[in-house]
Image (cartoon, coloured by chain):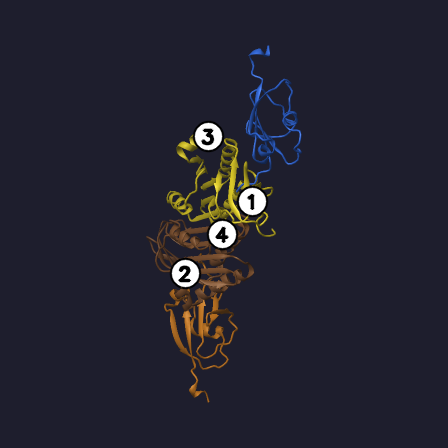
Chain colours: A blue, B orange, C brown, D yellow
Amino acid sequence: MKGEKSNKIKVVLLSSIAQDLGWNEKILTIEDSEMTVFSVWNLINSKLPQDNIIVSINQEITDMKAIINPDDEVAFMPMFTGG
Amino acid sequence: MKGEKSNKIKVVLLSSIAQDLGWNEKILTIEDSEMTVFSVWNLINSKLPQDNIIVSINQEITDMKAIINPDDEVAFMPMFTGG
Amino acid sequence: MMRWHLCQCLLVDNSKIQFRILKETFNPYKEFELWENFNKSSANSFFIGRVRPFDQYGNDLRKLEIVHYKGMTEKYIERYLMKISRKQDNLSILLLHRIGFIYPDEPIILIAVSANHRGISNKYLQEILEFTKYKVPLWKKEWTFKGSSWVKKNTDLGFEL
Amino acid sequence: MMRWHLCQCLLVDNSKIQFRILKETFNPYKEFELWENFNKSSANSFFIGRVRPFDQYGNDLRKLEIVHYKGMTEKYIERYLMKISRKQDNLSILLLHRIGFIYPDEPIILIAVSANHRGISNKYLQEILEFTKYKVPLWKKEWTFKGSSWVKKNTDLGFEL
């Protein structure tokens, strides 16, 4: 049934998170159909604390409990410091 | 005793007050040594109301009860509307 | 007062203040650029007030006339700008105000304030603007195609505080 | 997003909004002049933010780096500017923000707001400025002569509210 459907997601890291983990973008294959942003975070990161992290799905800010769908772009970023 | 001393004052009108009374500046001779701004106002004006008038002596804002000295410059002006 | 016409700039403690009463129109962008070249800070706030094309009753405006009380107007501006320069360190202020006849869309007032923080430059810019509206001896007369009349009351901020 | 690059200007009801994310430095006075030529109102408020010559620890700064999240940054700015344009009629807004490397004294941000009343142009200018500091996906990294570090916290307004 799921054979035709993509099960890949794009993970984007920004600013100090990209620097700390050493990469900016990765394409991941997801197995779990009920995967949350938090489970992606645990998958890619084993050292950074989760505090004060802003997360987005498809460039819309969301929270760690949000469910990820195939083809989604998930991003992890620190607090904004622009202006 | 007072012969050597000037007993003249300069009266300045600004904005709508100058227009309503028809002049901008006058030199007046004062007789009364205890003359107030209010008495100058009564001397020069018999038609305008006293409300919302700003008065100054020597370009410092004061009030109608202030005493005028010889050589003073007394001015009558409406509320400011600049900026 | 003479020193203003000679140096156009006064140092008060660590702050620089400058103002001019102008009989002719001016180019606000040129003024910003000239001034900011010598007053670059991390926060720079500017304001240009221009003549509306209608009078206080909604009629088409031909021109605005601004009258000042020579000597007293300058004294009140100088005293006020010196006061805020003493309250706040490292402030640069430029204030230009037109007098005489000013036509629709021409600038009447320009204010520039530089400071180390955005909150400070914005705060003093607004304070100076309200000051020029209510505390400086300046009067406006509106000339329409039917006649002229003195402005009785200042325009408000445009919203309820 | 493409329409921004084509027309650089969006009409929302009676208001005009415009923003650009810039990789190169710009001349703020030229930008004000070009923009205000088409957006002359009675009240015009402007802000230029420039790079401080020192970092968050007080060391000499070599350069500032600003990173954005391409697509998301533009989307959040556009959505916010459209929201305030719908709240307030007859507003014109210009917002420029630098990304990449920016050197001390160079402009990072320019905001221009035109309105019918001074209170409105000043109010929205400040709102937009605070918005860009706290609500837009933008990050600062400071490069000194010893190394680089990400800015953890925004500078404050400069005074107690």
Q: Nearer the viewer, mark 4 or mark 2?
A: 4
User: What residue did someone put label 1 on?
Assistant: D146
Classify mark 3: helix, strand or loop: loop
Asked which quadrant contains residue B74, the reply is bottom left
Asked which quadrant contains residue D5, the reply is top left
Could you tell me which quadrant the N terminus of chain A lies in?
Answer: top right
The crowd level at tag 1 (other Cα within 10 Å; few <14, some 14-19, many 20+) is few
* Chain where mark 2 sits: C
Classify mark 2: helix, strand or loop: strand
User: What residue did someone put label 2 on?
Assistant: C20
Q: Residue at x 49, y 82 (%)?
A: B33
* Chain where mark 3 sits: D
User: What residue did someone put label 4 on?
Assistant: C41
Classify mark 4: helix, strand or loop: loop
Q: Which of disc 2 and disc 4 is earlier in sequence?
A: 2
* Chain where mark 1 sits: D
Amino acid found under the numbered disc labelled 2: Arg
Judge if badges 4 and 2 mark residues of a common chain.
yes
